[in-house]
Image (tube, coloured by chain):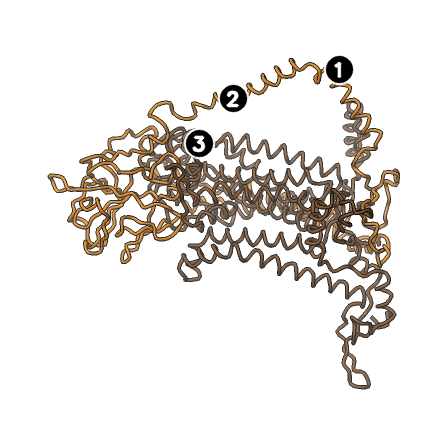
Chain colours: A orange, B brown
């Protein structure tokens, strides 16, 4: 390939190094100048050229075939069951995904590979060298531009007419306010401040503790030593099916019931009667950033959050023993009602979940 | 053939008569594009973004961004009658009731992972080769912004299907917002429309994900490419390739064919990945339930470092006037992105401060020739990778069969110790490579031929380099630390600028004080005339005819 200097003009604007790098010693090796690539096999060998041509055309032809195959597979590989009562066969979906994807993917790839091969082996463009020019405008243009700008500013009298300028700046400074105010109703207007809404759950005195999966009430005797059960308040069942309330409580109210040997427990002062026969209830919501905690190690009574590995000791008032959480898991005081079922003594005595500015110690 | 030319000619004629197109085309149709594999990384980012746009439009035709609660009646039997949001139900519909829907979902997700990976790799390429230097600082800033927007696009998209994983990700976002002092609960309440999770968030993320963020990305990509086009691409130095020219293939036809072809190759590879490697099978995770999470939850790779920072942060919390300030969340979730992005965005100016260099640079640096910059880059990579490992600490604990707490402690200490070590090691390696280049230029390459002299001395023959080979190793600019000059002038008057000049000189020494300089003309001549020169004992040179 030969070298064409297609843009030899304008050397007066070429980049000239400046700064004190001129003090540096001269370069040891002179620039030998652009060396020219050897001719490609396809440039000198007609057979190689024809072979390359066949390769490129072959790839494009194969791409066409694959595109047709894509359409065929779209029609042939069904995923819809004949009877809508029957479900979809996930295997059918995967066959459809594989056949459609392979044909389309290979077709795209071959079109691309063909184009690149065409450019590399058959297109005859020479290597081109263009001069670069310093990007800044020449001094004359810069001065003229600055002058135009100053003239314009002078013509408005922006600098002199302070009353107009200041009243305009004031008006413009206020105009973003409506845009901000309009966003106010993104959050609710009732139910107190966001922090107040965080202080309560639907747990209350006498609310039964239901198992999470079957929503059955639990007797103390149902729990064996070492067993852990996920639970929800009975009031959850009464929440409406639609609307955010139900899922919001799902994010706040879940507890874990765990039964330990009473002699293993280190119960803090004031919590002596918060449990029933070694059964304690803790919030399931991690105090770090709110993941539901779920990995319980029976022998150590350690509870690990799978998101960020905060570890809590359930035998020691939910105290943090490792990880990024800074506060203990809130404990729900429980008791037994007249029928022998576990119930809450009250709501949680502190907000559940992560720390936030308004909460107190 | 002639009809095509006629067709194209007619179009050019039509446009030219209306907007003088020929004038612009004449200057640009043969524009030079230099070739190097590392220049393709940015192209991968661009082409995968186009694939994301195409597949994303397809997905919007079925997906309903609604959190309305419904009982599933679709074709996927294991979920029949399960309560879920419409968003999750339509994601299942796309997967199981639309032919090619699963493929397009997987194309979209794979495309996003590749988009962010390619942007990151492209940015590292630009950093390590100094392509961010004047006059390309604006494009560097646009690039950093694009990376942030890319993560935002990825995260909002990850949240839309309303499956178990996406909901857990949002919960962590909520926890992070709550840690912001004073306004935390309000910010969260406005985002979620009340308490977490509410039933607004998906409808609110949707316009961000399909309109606002991609619109901004598209606009910035356009600006990025227009500036690139106007400034002409950087290139590597070499014989005939200087700071004042650009050498390569013409835009039309070579670059059009190669880049256009590469577009199809990238698209093809993404579709093949989507066809063969399952990604995020949301039907297995189930609909979002805030009281459930599975072990081993992982975000997409580009969020991993933030999740890792959350995992390894110690449980620091203190009180300001009885208000908790949760540093254990605030630092990793809110402050860390700023701590990383600010120096990243400002780096071109920081380096300019150190070098005092305000000239235009169009030749790329070989990473070894700027050891300090390369060291900083590698230290950053180590820092990032450590946080990324922390994000999978449970995964690595399982593989290595060690307690997860050990990994957490290793990262807590390593995050401060390992990046400086990586800096020092990288800088040393670069200096070693520079020294080898210098040796090669002065004494030629090692031939592997060992000679025994008559008095029994063994030595290896060195073959001199050709002028081109030697020039390849010496075209770079000689970088000398700047000299602050005297503190006082000849009359003993203190130089008012001396203090700032001394700071600049110190930074400059930090950057260039240890650089191994390429030989001077005199050094080279001395080496050639004296094969047994002072720093080249026991070396013989092969006569050039014998190599």
For the residues tagged 3 and 1, is the chain the same? Answer: no
Alpha-carbon span between mark 3 and mark 1:
46 Å
Q: Name the residue under label 3.
A: B187
Whole-angstrom CA distance, mark 1 to mark 2, is 33 Å
- For this rendering, which residue is in front, B67 or B195? B195
Q: In this view, does B406 lie above or below A333?
A: below
Residue A65 visible in the snapshot: no
Picture coordinates of residue B121, whole percent (x, y): 61, 48
Residue B122 horizontal/vertical position (percent): 64, 46
User: Which corner quadrant holds the C terminus of chain A?
Assistant: top left
Contact, mark 3 vs mark 1 (Cβ under 8 Å): no
Answer left or right for A100 relative to A59.
Answer: left
Instruction: Locate residue B203 relative to residue B542 in the image: left or right.
Output: left
Q: Which of the two discs, 1 and 2, sits closer to the camera?
A: 1
Chain of the residue on which disc 1 is drawn: A
The x and y percentages for residue A212 are 26, 42
Say what secondary structure mark 1 lies in: helix
Label 1 with label 2: CB-CB less than 8 Å: no
Tag 2 residue: A179
- Name the residue beneath numbered marker 1: A155
Q: Compare marks 1 and 2 and give the one earlier in the sequence.
A: 1
| Depth order, front residue of B120/A82 | B120
- Determine crowd level at label 3: few under 14, some 14-19, many 20+ residues with C-alpha closer than 10 A: some
Residue A358 placement: quadrant: top left
Circle 2 SS class: helix
Chain on which label 2 sits:
A
How crowded pointer 1 is (Cα within 10 Å; few <14, some 14-19, many 20+) is rated as few
């Amino acid at each position: 390939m030969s070298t064409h200097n297609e843009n030899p003009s304008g050397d007066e604007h070429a980049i000239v190094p400046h700064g004190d790098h001129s003090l540096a010693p001269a370069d040891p090796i002179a620039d030998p100048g652009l060396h020219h690539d050897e001719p490609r096999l396809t440039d000198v060998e007609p057979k190689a050229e024809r072979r390359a041509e066949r390769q490129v055309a072959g790839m494009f032809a194969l791409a066409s075939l694959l595109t047709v195959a894509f359409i065929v597979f779209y029609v042939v590989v069904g995923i819809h069951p004949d009877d809508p009562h029957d479900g979809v066969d996930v295997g059918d979906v995967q066959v459809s995904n594989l056949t459609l994807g392979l044909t389309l993917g290979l077709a795209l790839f071959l079109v691309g590979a063909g184009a690149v091969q065409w450019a590399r082996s058959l297109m005859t463009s020479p290597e081109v060298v263009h001069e670069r020019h310093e990007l800044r405008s020449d001094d004359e243009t810069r001065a003229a531009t600055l002058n135009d700008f100053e003239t314009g500013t002078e013509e408005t009298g922006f600098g002199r007419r302070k009353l107009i300028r200041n009243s305009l700046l004031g008006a413009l400074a206020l105009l973003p306010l409506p845009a901000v105010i309009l966003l106010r109703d993104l959050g609710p207007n009732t139910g107190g401040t966001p922090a107040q809404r965080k202080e309560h759950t639907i747990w209350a005195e006498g609310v039964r503790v239901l198992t999470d999966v079957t929503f059955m009430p639990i007797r103390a005797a149902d729990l064996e030593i070492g067993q852990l059960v996920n639970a929800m308040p009975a009031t959850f069942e009464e929440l409406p099916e639609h609307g955010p309330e139900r899922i919001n409580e799902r994010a706040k109210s879940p507890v874990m019931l765990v039964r330990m040997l009473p002699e293993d427990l280190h119960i803090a002062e004031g919590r002596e009667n918060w449990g029933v026969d070694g059964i304690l209830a803790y919030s399931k919501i991690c105090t770090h950033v709110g993941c539901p905690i779920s990995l319980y190690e029976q022998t150590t009574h350690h509870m690990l959050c799978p998101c960020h590995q905060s570890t809590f000791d359930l035998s020691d008032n939910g105290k943090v023993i490792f990880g990024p959480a800074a506060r203990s898991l809130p404990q729900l005081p429980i008791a037994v009602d007249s029928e022998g079922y576990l119930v809450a003594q009250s709501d949680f005595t502190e907000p559940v979940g992560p720390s936030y500015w308004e909460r107190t110690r | 053939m002639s009809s095509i030319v006629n067709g194209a000619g007619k179009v050019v004629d039509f446009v030219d008569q209306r907007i003088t197109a020929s004038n612009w085309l004449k200057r640009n149709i043969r524009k030079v594009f230099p070739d190097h594999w590392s220049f393709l990384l940015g192209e991968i980012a661009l082409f995968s973004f186009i694939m994301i746009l195409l597949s994303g439009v397809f997905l919007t035709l079925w997906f309903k961004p609604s959190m309305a609660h419904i009982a599933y009646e679709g074709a996927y039997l294991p979920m029949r009658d399960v309560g879920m949001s419409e968003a999750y139900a339509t994601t299942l519909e796309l997967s199981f009731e639309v032919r090619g829907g699963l493929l397009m979902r997987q194309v979209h997700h794979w495309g996003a992972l590749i988009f962010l990976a390619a942007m990151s790799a492209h940015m590292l390429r630009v950093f390590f080769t100094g392509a961010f230097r004047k006059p390309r600082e604006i494009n560097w800033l646009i690039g950093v912004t694009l990376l942030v927007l890319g993560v935002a696009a990825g995260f909002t998209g990850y949240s839309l299907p309303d499956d178990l994983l996406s909901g857990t990700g949002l919960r962590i976002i909520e926890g992070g917002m709550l840690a912001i002092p004073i306004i935390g609960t309000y910010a969260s309440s406005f985002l979620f429309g009340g308490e977490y999770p509410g039933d607004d968030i998906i409808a609110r993320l949707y316009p961000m994900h399909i309109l606002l963020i991609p619109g901004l990305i598209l606009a910035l990509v356009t600006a990025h490419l227009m500036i690139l086009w106007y400034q002409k691409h950087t290139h590597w130095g070499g014989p005939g390739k200087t700071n004042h020219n650009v050498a390569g293939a013409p835009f039309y036809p070579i670059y059009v064919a190669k880049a256009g072809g590469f577009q199809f190759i990238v698209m093809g590879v993404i579709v093949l990945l989507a066809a063969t490697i399952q990604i995020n099978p949301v039907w297995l995770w189930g609909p979002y339930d805030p009281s459930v999470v599975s072990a081993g939850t992982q975000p997409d790779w580009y969020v991993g470092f933030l999740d890792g920072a959350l995992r390894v942060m110690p449980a620091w919390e203190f009180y300001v006037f009885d208000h908790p300030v949760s540093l254990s969340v605030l630092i990793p979730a809110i402050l860390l992105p700023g701590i990383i992005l600010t120096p990243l965005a400002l780096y071109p100016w920081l380096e300019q401060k150190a070098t005092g260099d305000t000239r235009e640079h169009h030749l790329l640096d070989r990473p070894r020739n700027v050891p300090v910059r390369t060291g900083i880059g590698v230290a950053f990579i180590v820092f990032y990778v450590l946080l990324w490992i922390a994000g999978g600490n449970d995964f690595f604990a399982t593989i290595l069969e060690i307690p997860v707490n050990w990994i957490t402690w290793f990262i807590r200490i390593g995050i401060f110790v390992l990046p400086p070590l990586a800096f020092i090691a990288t800088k040393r390696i670069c200096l070693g490579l520079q020294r080898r280049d210098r040796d090669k230029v002065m004494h030629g390459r090692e031939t592997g031929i060992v000679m025994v002299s008559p008095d029994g001395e063994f030595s290896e023959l060195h073959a001199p380099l050709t002028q081109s080979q030697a020039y390849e190793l010496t075209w770079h600019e000689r970088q000398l630390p700047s000299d602050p000059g005297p503190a006082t002038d000849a009359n003993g008057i203190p130089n008012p600028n001396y203090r700032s000049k001394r700071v600049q000189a110190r930074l400059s020494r930090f950057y260039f004080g240890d650089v191994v300089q390429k030989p001077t003309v005199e050094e080279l001549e001395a080496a050639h005339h004296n094969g047994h020169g002072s720093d080249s004992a026991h070396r013989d040179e092969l006569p050039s005819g014998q190599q």
